[in-house]
Image: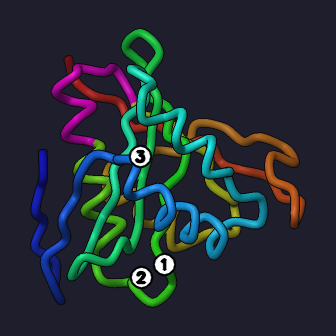
Amino acid sequence: MLFVYKTMNNSVNIEKLKREHIEGVAQIENVCFSEPWSTGAFESEINNENAFFYIASVDNIIAGYMGFHTVLDEGYAANIAVLPEYRRQGIASALMQNAVNICKSVPLSFLSLEVRISNGAAIALYERFGFKIVGERKNFYSSPKENAYIMTLYFDR
């Protein structure tokens, strides 16, 4: 199923991760993260019934992706990433809105994630969606070593 979100600058197409998207998503991982996931890790998520991974494309270019896992009625975001040249165009917001819509339809009690405490842009995005800081994980990230905030969005059920 394809979802289309209108942003300030363009239309963002959101669709479920497929095999043909793996290379593009792996490129995003390599650009955005110091410890990227392997292509095999993404391939395994395609058949994982508890995984919800979606790509965002603009003009047929994979510009970003987001994935989360479910455990019973709980959601845990794995990653959200947008290529630098596509940032500040509403793509991360479209991916997050898609995830929130899915969480509500499943339905889940909450969606939780970790974010570097220095990542002000991501924290601001999550706060716009109603996420709250509920804790901190010491030395959660390496390369460079940094603490993470645990942020959670609770859903009314």
Q: Give the side of residue 149 with respect to residue 76, left or right.
A: right
Mark 3, Cα crowd under 10 Å, few <14 / some 14-19 / many 20+, is: many
Give yes or no for contact between labels 2 and 1 (Cβ–Cβ under 8 Å).
yes
User: Could you tell which of marks 2 and 3 lies nearer the N-terminus?
Assistant: 2
Measuring from the top left, give residue 17's x and y in whole percent: 35, 48
Instruction: State the residue in front, 19 or 87.
Output: 19
Q: CA distance from mark 3 to mark 1?
A: 23 Å
Of the numbered discs in the image, which one, if any, rests on residue 131? 3
The residue under label 2 is 87
Q: CA distance from mark 2 to mark 1?
A: 7 Å
Mark 2, Cα crowd under 10 Å, few <14 / some 14-19 / many 20+, is: few
Residue type at mark 3?
A: Phe
Tell me, yes or no, whether the highlighted magenta stretch contains residue 102: yes
Q: Nearer the viewer, mark 2 or mark 3?
A: 2
Magenta stretch, residue numbers: 100-110
Q: Residue at the spot x=54%, y=69% of the render?
A: 28
What is the secondary structure assignment of the residue under circle 2? loop
Residue type at mark 1?
A: Leu
Give yes or no for contact between labels 2 and 3 (Cβ–Cβ under 8 Å).
no
Residue type at mark 2?
A: Arg
Residue 52, above or below 124 = above
Measuring from the top left, give residue 98's x and y in whole percent: 23, 49
Q: Can you say which quadrant of the picture contains the C terminus?
A: top left
Q: Residue at the spot x=67%, y=51% of the render?
A: 37
Q: Nearer the viewer, mark 3 or mark 1?
A: 1
The residue under label 1 is 83
Residue 11, image quadrant: bottom left
Instruction: State the residue in front, 127 or 68.
Output: 68
Residue 125, image quadrant: bottom left
Measuring from the top left, give residue 96's x and y in whole percent: 32, 54
